[in-house]
Image (cartoon, rainbow, N blue to C red):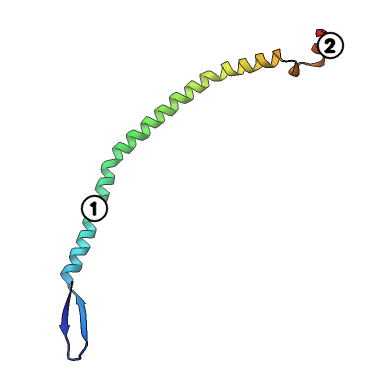
Amino acid sequence: RCQLFQVSRPEVILYPRPENMLLKMMNADIDEKTLLINQGLNFPHTLEDLSARVDAVREENLKLKSENPVLRQYIENLMTDSSVFQTTERKSKRK
């Protein structure tokens, strides 16, 4: 709130009360500190979540790496059995 002060002239001048401004600044500081404290308290949870995600990705990567040789062999077998990928020499021998 502002206090009204009468001056010698007919107009009214409004001045902010210093204690109100100080309270607003203190409240802003408290809000900022609270926000920082809450963020700091959430860091361990965030770190745990990230660690769990890294572990899950590692497991998925190992699984996919183990599947790769199987898929490679399967594709090679398909290519060997398919006449599309045979050389002309093999085609002529089959006939």
Name the amino acid type tagged 1: Lys
Q: Residue at x 56, y 20 (%)?
A: 68
Name the amino acid type tagged 2: Ser
Residue 1 vertical position relative to residue 4 in the rendered view, above or below? above
Quarter placement of the C terminus:
top right
In the displayed structure, does residue 56 sit left or right of residue 23? right
Judging by the rendered image, the residue that carries numbered circle 2 is 92
Q: Secondary structure at mark 2?
A: helix
Task: Give whichever of 6, 57 is nearer the camera.
Answer: 6
Q: Residue at x 74, y 18 (%)?
A: 85
Q: Secondary structure at mark 1?
A: helix
Q: Position of residue 36 (x, y in %)?
A: 27, 49
Judging by the rendered image, the residue that carries numbered circle 1 is 33
Quarter placement of the N terminus:
bottom left
Q: Residue at x 24, y 53 (%)?
A: 33
Residue 86 vertical position relative to residue 36 in the rendered view, above or below? above
Q: Position of residue 62 (x, y in %)?
A: 47, 22
